[in-house]
Image (spheres, helix red, strand yellow):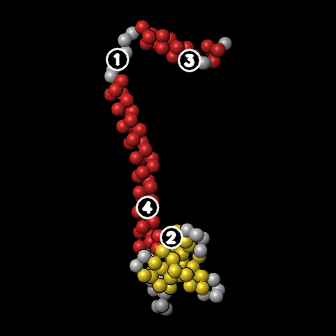
Amino acid sequence: MFRTLFPFLEAAGESAGAADSAPSTGNPLIQTIIMITLFGLAMYFLLYRPQKKQEKVIAEMRSSLKVGDEISTNGGILGKIIQIKDDFLVIETGNDRTKLKVAKWAVRAIEKRVEEDEGEEE
C-alpha cells in the first residue's frame, strides 16, 4: 500500500542503490562552487537589489521636501515643514503651533504635498 501511495519514493530508492555500485561522475568541488554561486545570486536578486531600490526612492523623497509639505517622522510625529536647513527641518505640529527641529533622515513619508501654484487663483 505504501508503494502505491508514494511511487516516487520507490524509484528514488532504486536509483540510490544503483548509485552506490557505480562510480560518481563530476567533481564535488565544482558542484559546491556552482551551488554557492547560485545561492549568492539568489540572495542578490531577492534581498540586496530590492533594498537598494527602496533606499533610492526614500532618498529622492527626502531630497524633494519643500516648505509647506505635511510629513510624518519615524517616531510618529506629524507636522508641517516651515523651514529647511541642510540636514534638518523645522516642523510645526498641533494646534498650538509647537515647533520641532527634526533630522531629514527621520522623515518617513510625505502625507500631503504643497501645491506648486498654491498662491495663484484662477
Which of label 4 and label 3 is nearer to you? 4
Tell me which label, 1 or 3, sits earlier in the chain.
Answer: 3
Give amino acid for label 2.
Answer: Ala
Q: CA distance from mark 4 to mark 3?
A: 47 Å
Residue 49 in the image: above or below residue 36:
below
Q: Which mark is residue 106?
A: 2
Q: Which residue is mark 3?
A: 9
Q: Which residue is mark 1?
A: 25
Near mark 1 (Cα within 10 A), the count class, few <14, some 14-19 or many ≥20, is: few
Near mark 3 (Cα within 10 A), the count class, few <14, some 14-19 or many ≥20, is: few
Tell me where residue 50 appears, x and y as whole percent.
44, 53
Give amino acid for label 3.
Answer: Leu
Tell me which label, 1 or 4, sits earlier in the chain.
Answer: 1
Q: CA distance from mark 1 to mark 3?
A: 23 Å
Element on which disc 3 rests: helix
Q: Is residue 99 left or right of residue 63?
A: right
Element on which disc 1 rests: loop
Element on which disc 2 rests: helix
Q: Which residue is mark 4?
A: 55
Residue beneath the point at 47% across and 70% down: 105
Tell me which label, 4 or 2, sits earlier in the chain.
Answer: 4
Tell me where residue 42 appears, x and y as whole percent.
42, 42
Q: Which mark is residue 120?
A: none
Q: CA distance from mark 1 to mark 2?
A: 57 Å
Q: CA distance from mark 2 to mark 3?
A: 56 Å
Residue nearer the viewer, 42 or 112: 42
Do residues under tags 1 and 4 come within 8 Å of each other at their CB atoms?
no
Give amino acid for label 1.
Answer: Thr
Tell me which label, 2 or 3, sits earlier in the chain.
Answer: 3
Tell me which label, 4 or 3, sits earlier in the chain.
Answer: 3
